[in-house]
Amino acid sequence: SNYNTTNSIEIALNATDLLSPISYVYSNITFSNSSSQVLILSTAGGDKYNASFSVPNLLGRYNITFFVNDSAGNINESEATYFNVYDNIYPTAQFISPTPLNGSLQAINTTRINISITDNIATGDCILEFDGINVTMTKIGSGTNTLCNYTKTQISVGWHNFTVYFNDSSGNTNRTETRTYQIDVSIPFVEFVFPTETSGTYLTRSNILINATASAEVSI
């Protein structure tokens, strides 16, 4: 049988003894890393004995041997059986500062994109798609919680978008939401125009007229 990590599964056996009542039944579960766990089985009615087993975050083959002891002290064991544990849980991620917020405006043409990734087994690699071009991000750390970052430089003025694709050690892949933001490093041009008062003019009224035009490479 095949199971996923974190599953709760039933370990069960049918056991009978023609001469003496059965005292107890247990199983020895050997993990894929050669460690083991003894699991006591309880009667489930009739000849059935069972127990619940929570599959840990450890992939591979698990071997099971059952042992039955009767009231006369006789012990017997089953032949070994096994099940396999796989990982189909997707990693998750979230953007962290100073990653630009969606719809934001930046006044510099350098952008740093950071994400924090979490997985039940181990995180994998991160790929940044920036304006349709893929680059490999720098991974920091190892294990179930890691960071990935990338600094994009010399970005042109205007709107840009980015998405991060990432995976785990089992090959499960996921992606972040796509964020769009604007770069504007230009200095807006402002000019007084008619009928703005001439500089240095002496006025005998209590109000003044000011009119100006402004322009920039992006919308003001």
Image (spheres, rainbow, N blue to C red):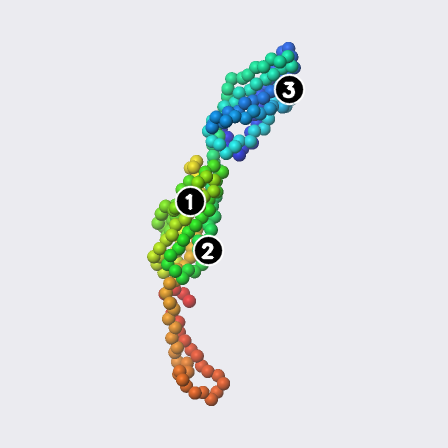
Quadrant of residue 49 within the rendered picture: top right
Name the residue at 47% across, 42% down. 145
The answer for how far apart the CA atoms under marks 3 and 1 are is 55 Å
Name the residue at 45% across, 87% down. 203
Residue type at mark 1?
Ile
Residue type at mark 3?
Gly
Locate residue 218 relative to residue 59 in the image: left or right.
left
The answer for how far apart the CA atoms under marks 2 and 1 are is 22 Å
User: Between disc 3 and disc 1, whose residue precedes?
Assistant: 3
Locate residue 104 relative to residue 17 in the image: left or right.
left
Say which residue label 3 marks.
46
Say which residue label 1 marks.
140
Q: Element at badge 3?
A: loop
Q: Position of residue 40 (x, y in %)?
A: 60, 24
Say which residue label 2 marks.
101
User: Between disc 2 and disc 1, whose residue precedes?
Assistant: 2
Q: Element at badge 2?
A: loop
Asked whether the viewer can see residue 188, the reply is: yes
Locate residue 151 relative to residue 204 in the image: left or right.
left
Q: Position of residue 71 (x, y in %)?
A: 65, 14
